[in-house]
Image: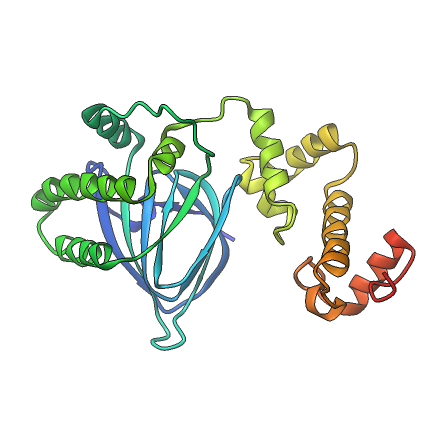
Amino acid sequence: MNTIILPDDLNLNSSISICAYDYSSNKEISKQQIVLNKNTFSFLQEGTKEVFFDDSSCSINSSQFLLMKSGHCLMTEKLSKVSEHYRSILFFFSNEDILKFIRKFEFDFANKATLCSAYSFDYDSFLNRFVDSLTDITKLSITVQQKMLKLKFEEILLYLIDLKGESFLQSLVYEIDNQNQKFIQTIERNKLNKLTIKELSFLSNMSVSSFKREFEKYYHTSPSKWFQDKRLQHAAFLLKNKSKRPTEIFAEVGYESLSSFIQAFKGKYGVTPKQY
């Protein structure tokens, strides 16, 4: 699977710092490797979207939109059952744009926020009008777009800060210096997501072999054994505390069939899921 680099692969004018793109497709993608070279709003219009980052994941439908920090992610896009299309208005901006915004409006981040790479928001009447105006701007000349999108960038951030607070803004400018901490964070936050070792390696910006070496250094076991153990622990929790049945959870905890789940569960706990 080829890695897609955004916004570079959209052939947008690289000299423009803040840019918008009306993206549509009639093809679905599943856990596509994406490198975001800029921070990105994805104003979903048709279909559904799911993203995995090293520290967070989000799923949205067309009543919501995403804000994604620059970096590596896995992206799934599914078509609308009504129109059989996927459409999203993409709004790109750089880290420097964020820093200029913070200096201009004098944010000081007095309260430390929980940091993550992806945030989802619900549309309201203001935001629907904002996206409509953004779509209209993409049809204008590059010179006019450049001037107007700078204003739209400030407009959307000021509105979301007033609506939701500053935590998402902190996440955009915060960098984790400790790579060891970031690696462990990637593992822990994705332990119940059904991601392959190759996909986790991509999120960690490592080769598969480097990922496995680092993993065994910190966890003293193989990735496959560790993830299976964590998912079986979660299955046991669901069976005991949530009154779930084996048929309801085997796919959720990463097994292709009920029989393979029962076999693995019995191997760990000595009894079948039903007996447990």
Q: In the picture provided, is 153 more to the left or to the right than 255? A: left
Query: Looking at the image, is 196 positioned above or below residue 27?
Result: above
Q: In the picture provided, is 61 more to the left or to the right than 232? A: left
Please identify the quarter of the rendering in which residue 161 is found: top left
Residue 259 locus on image (x, y percent): 81, 68
Task: List the single residue furthest toward the bottom.
Answer: 82
Please identify the quarter of the rendering in which residue 180 is found: top right
The quadrant of the picture occupied by the C terminus is bottom right
Residue 89 locus on image (x, y percent): 27, 56
- Residue 21: in sight, yes or no? yes
Q: Residue at x 27, y 31 (%)?
A: 98
- Residue 51: in sight, yes or no? no
Colour option used = rainbow
Please identify the quarter of the rendering in which residue 36 is found: top left
Residue 40 locus on image (x, y percent): 33, 44
Q: In the picture provided, is 88 more to the left or to the right than 265? A: left
Q: Residue at x 61, y 51 (%)?
A: 193
Query: Looking at the image, is 81 positioned above or below residue 220?
Result: below
Of residues 233 and 142, the one drawn nearer to the viewer in this rendering: 233
Residue 129 locus on image (x, y percent): 18, 58
Of residues 110 and 67, the one drawn nearer to the viewer in this rendering: 110
